[in-house]
């Protein structure tokens, strides 16, 4: 069974009255819900009701009884402000979204929030809100579908064969992210990706002419997309033919510019910005229903005739899913090993033995004996081992793989016409990389990572935040994590970035200090299933840490642990550090110990993990009765008082860097072992003075 490249055909619609009632039900539910909430965006759902009806009732392969059916078509409402369009379609199609939830639009505890949210509302494929993110997600979904289809499909057994549909807005296309994502989609010739552009020429401030005069058809043609224009958003036949032609185009992604009138049907607000970001008003809702010839003025009323038409989605969806299950059953009989791998991939599970591919050193290595190595280099070696153990691990970087060490050396590149590759090339497109990685994780079946310099995580921040909000298992490889990168200077040297990323809820921060911690960090990053993780890695070589004994991976995995214990096991001062500054803390501890000051060194690789340990463990590592503490991290000192308390000293960098060799910068900015010793003595003096 295959659907790719099917020829356009004329759709057999029910009679005109039933079709009109089914479409107007979307309009009425949307404007009634926005009116009841007294906030929201009624105009776009009213204009897009016809294309929404055609997609969800007749074109989209989906099963409301099983929203997670693996081979469903994906639908992304990138114009997330038009959320009531999606909620109306879900409700009418038979998803578990009763009318009570439509009535409770934007209210506390409802499943119909202001913008669609993954795992909050059944049938929602991604959290959209920030414009441009949804279209970038869709490119990731289409990339994942292509890779999985090549990996698993066999002649006569197309177990992965579906499309990704998007409704996007002027705002999506104005955001620069849309350029990055669309250009990459065109380059890869993603023929199963279809964007429908709501071309209504209205934004919040008024006409799009205030800020844009772009010919979107020529723009997307330049990207290598298949482009079509439909001049009337209510012309069902033309929309139907355009969707069919888009599916038949196998070698290019498709862009359909659909000319609509915002709030179509409203006598006084159609075509105006007044319908973009606020309710129509009770009187205008009544006038609109009268203008539509709608049979009832009662809020949230849907004609039984319309409900019966929409009810056809359920049996159609069940039949499609059952047909796919039959295909999978035959596939499993002929290709049992591949079928098992497909099951595991779809379930998001890693192979049972994957962690053993990342061994933790079995013996202590002193800094005098071990070889210094940048943690980015350690990470690169670990990626090779992980790729051998996890066949669906894919990743790449924003044109920086030689510096990030993110290339899987035994794998090919994923390129147009070569979909078997596991090395992704995002080009100089960090923003799109973040959104595309999210889309691949949302699609499922692959485990993904992406790399760039830590400084450029700023470009990715919106997508990172959404990955954390959605709980997506995406790994970020952020190298060149401090002034230690050296001569490139302050434009490339991150200062506030670690703290800014640590401020994102549900984002796992991992800043390892040597090869051992880097191995544990990768285990933590890939073992996580409920959110993203980033590894902050050095460009400069760092010595292996002198632990005195083999580290317990479970201790390291707590995020903070005792790296070096004080003589006698009872410290007078505690030095806390992360990453490349850990060896400075160890060096300072030796000097303090030699001078008769029992000193403990704590590695705080992850604030996220350490803060989630029970109080007993935290107080064992950082005893409350040892208030003399020093933190050292080559970045902003903001936030460190949480761990060092009122009598501690924070060594950091609260200014921009400079252009010079990394070692020079650490010395000139006072991030040295000597400074740690000095600050430790100052903290001790303060504590003793208080006593």
Image (spheres, rainbow, N blue to C red):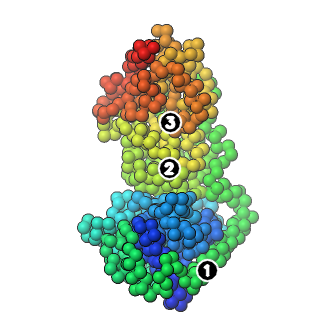
Taking the spot 54% from the left edge, 62% from the top edge, the residue there is 111
Whether residue 533 is situated above or below residue 656 in the rendered picture:
below
> Badge 2: few (under 14), some or many (20 or more) residues near its Cα, within 10 Å?
many
Distance from disc 2 to disc 3, alpha carbons, whole Å, reads 15 Å
Is residue 7 rendered to the left or right of residue 427?
A: right
Q: Which mark is residue 468?
A: 2
The tag earlier along the polypeptide, 3 or 1, is 1
Q: Nearer the viewer, residue 37 or 334?
A: 37
Identify which residue is drawn at 72% across, 63% down: 332
Residue 360 location in percent, x, y?
Answer: 61, 32
Q: Residue at x 36, y 67 (%)?
A: 277
Give the labeled residue for mark 1. 312
Q: Is residue 53 visible?
A: no
- The residue identified by callout 3 is 607
Give whichever of discs 2 and 3 has the lower sequence position: 2
Q: CA distance from mark 3 to mark 1?
A: 51 Å
Question: Could you tell me residue 94's position as x and y percent?
Answer: 60, 73
Q: Are the two marked residues, 3 and 1, in contact with CB atoms closer than 8 angstroms?
A: no
- The residue most toward the left is 210
Which quadrant, please, contains the C terminus? top left
Earlier-in-chain disc, 1 versus 2? 1
Which disc is residue 418 wearing? none
Please name whichever residue, 664 or 471, is drawn nearer the observer in this view of the structure. Answer: 471
Secondary element under disc 1, as helix, strand or loop, is loop
């Amino acid at each position: 069974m295959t659907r790719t490249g099917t020829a356009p055909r004329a759709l057999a619609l029910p009679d005109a009255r039933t079709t009109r009632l089914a479409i107007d039900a979307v309009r009425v539910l949307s404007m009634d819900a926005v009116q009841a909430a007294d906030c929201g965006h009624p105009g776009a759902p009213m204009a897009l009701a016809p294309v929404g009806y055609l997609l969800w009732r007749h074109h989209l392969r989906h099963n409301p009884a099983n929203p997670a059916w693996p081979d469903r078509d994906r639908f992304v409402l990138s114009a997330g402000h038009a959320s009531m369009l999606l909620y109306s379609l879900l409700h009418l199609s038979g998803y578990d979204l009763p009318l009570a939830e439509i009535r409770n639009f934007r209210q506390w505890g409802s499943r119909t929030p202001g913008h669609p949210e993954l795992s909050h509302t059944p049938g929602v494929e991604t959290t959209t809100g920030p414009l441009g993110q949804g279209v970038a997600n869709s490119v990731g979904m289409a990339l994942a579908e292509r890779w999985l289809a090549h990996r698993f499909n066999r002649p006569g057994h197309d177990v992965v064969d579906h499309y990704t549909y998007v409704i996007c807005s002027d705002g999506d296309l104005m955001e620069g992210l849309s350029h990055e994502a669309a250009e990459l989609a065109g380059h890869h010739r993603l023929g199963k990706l279809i964007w429908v552009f709501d071309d209504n020429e209205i934004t919040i401030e008024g006409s799009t002419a205030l800020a844009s005069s772009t010919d979107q058809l020529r723009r997307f043609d330049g990207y290598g997309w298949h482009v079509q224009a439909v001049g009337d958003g209510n012309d069902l036949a033309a929309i139907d033919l355009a969707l069919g032609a888009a599916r038949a185009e196998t070698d290019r992604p498709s862009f359909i510019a659909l000319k609509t009138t915002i709030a179509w049907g409203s006598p006084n607000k159609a075509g105006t910005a007044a319908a973009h970001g606020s309710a129509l008003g009770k009187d205008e809702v009544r006038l609109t229903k009268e203008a539509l010839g709608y049979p009832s003025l009662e809020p949230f009323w849907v004609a039984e005739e319309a409900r019966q038409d929409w009810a056809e989605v359920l049996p159609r969806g069940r039949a499609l899913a059952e047909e796919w299950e039959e295909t999978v059953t035959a596939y499993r009989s002929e290709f049992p090993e591949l079928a098992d791998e497909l099951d595991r991939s779809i379930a998001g599970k890693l192979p049972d033995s994957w962690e053993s591919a990342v061994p933790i050193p079995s013996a202590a290595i002193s800094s005098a004996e071990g070889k210094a190595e940048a943690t980015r280099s350690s990470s690169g070696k670990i990626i090779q081992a992980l790729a051998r153990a996890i066949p669906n691990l894919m990743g790449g970087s924003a044109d920086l793989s030689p510096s990030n060490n993110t290339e899987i050396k035994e794998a090919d590149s994923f390129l147009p016409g070569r979909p078997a590759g596991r090395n992704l090339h995002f080009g100089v497109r960090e923003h799109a990389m973040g959104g595309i990685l999210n889309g691949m994780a949302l699609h499922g079946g692959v485990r993904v990572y992406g790399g760039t310099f830590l400084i450029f995580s700023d470009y990715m921040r919106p997508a990172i935040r959404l990955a954390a909000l959605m709980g997506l298992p995406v790994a970020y490889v952020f190298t060149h994590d401090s002034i230690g990168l050296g001569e490139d200077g302050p434009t490339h040297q991150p200062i506030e970035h670690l703290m800014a990323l640590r401020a994102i809820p549900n984002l796992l921060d991992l800043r390892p200090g040597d090869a051992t911690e880097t191995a544990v960090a990768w285990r933590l990053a890939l073992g996580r299933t409920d959110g993203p993780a980033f590894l902050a890695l050095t460009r400069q070589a760092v010595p292996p840490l002198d632990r005195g004994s083999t580290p317990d991976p479970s201790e390291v995995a707590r995020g903070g642990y005792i790296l070096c214990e004080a003589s006698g096991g009872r410290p007078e001062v505690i030095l806390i550090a992360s990453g490349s500054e850990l060896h400075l803390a160890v060096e300072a501890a030796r000097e303090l110990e030699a001078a008769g000051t029992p000193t403990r060194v704590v590695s705080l690789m992850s604030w996220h993990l350490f803060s989630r340990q029970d109080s007993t463990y935290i107080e064992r590592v950082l005893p409350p009765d040892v208030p003399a503490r020093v933190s050292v991290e080559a970045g902003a000192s903001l936030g460190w008082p949480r761990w060092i308390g009122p009598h501690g000293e924070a060594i950091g960098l609260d200014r921009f860097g400079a252009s010079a060799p990394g070692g020079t910068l650490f010395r000139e900015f006072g991030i040295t072992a000597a400074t740690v010793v000095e600050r430790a003595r100052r903290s001790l003096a303060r504590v003793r003075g208080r006593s």
